Image (cartoon, rainbow, N blue to C red):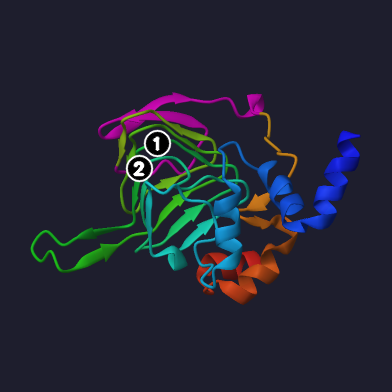
Amino acid sequence: MKNIIKAFVYFVFPPLKKYHRFLKSQTSRVTFKQWCRFWLKKDKRLYWPVNDTSLVTHPKNIYVGINSKLGIQTNNYIQGNGGIYIGDYVTIARNVGIISANHDVYDHSKHFKKEVRIDDYCWIGMNVMIMPGVHLGPRTVVGAGSVVTKSFPDGYCVIGGNPAKLIKELDKEKFVPTKYEEEYYGFVPKEEFKEFAKKHLKRNKYIEMMLQ
């Protein structure tokens, strides 16, 4: 009986079915209102969920991979001025800042832009600050409260401190790849993302690579 009622509701109101499918790609709750708001708005450059307490700037310069969470937690500050690449299945905790441009120390009206790259399956702990030019390789774990000022491109490690240093190297063979029941680029199903990108997103270098 329950399945019959569900099928009837989905038939009468198809968006609800799409929303329930979308929720299977999420570990953090996204409301039906937030989901509808994205699909109804004209400007879709910010194509992933962002908490109302978080701030994302220059979304046209940001790429967010499959089932990654950028700004969905509270009080994140994501500054995409210099470009930010987020790989697949990246987890970012509360109060995290990612900065891709900084002021000239002699002329505060000028910015120096440096890309930030965070590869697949990284885990960024609470209260972390990631500074311009940083590249974190796959499976990097950043301890809570760290300030990351240099790159760890090889990944498979735990880093922490201010400035962040290598704490522990991790065994690649022990990792189990995470796969959710449904895979999405932000709000967009994986199988629909290329067409979505062609229609709605600026052709930055990240999108060009993905479309090839």
Q: CA distance from mark 1 to mark 2?
A: 6 Å
* Residue in front for this viewpoint, 64 or 1: 1
Which residues, given as a range, are shown in magenta? 149-175
**Screen quadrant of the N terminus:** top right
Residue 75 marker: 2
Q: Look at the image and tell me whether residue 114 can be seen.
A: yes
* Residue in front for this viewpoint, 40 or 178: 40
Q: x and y percent of residue 24 in the render? A: 70, 41
Q: x and y percent of residue 100 in the render? A: 33, 57
Q: Look at the image and tell me whether residue 186 can be seen.
A: no
Residue type marked 2? Asn
Residue 42 found in image quarter: bottom right
Residue 35 marker: none
Residue at the location (34% across, 36% down)? 128
Residue 19 in the image: above or below residue 176: below
Left or right of 20? Residue 34 is left
Label 1 crowding class (10 Å Cα cut-off): few <14, some 14-19, many 20+?
A: some
Residue at the location (67% across, 35% down)? 178
Residue type marked 1? Arg
Label 2 crowding class (10 Å Cα cut-off): few <14, some 14-19, many 20+?
A: some
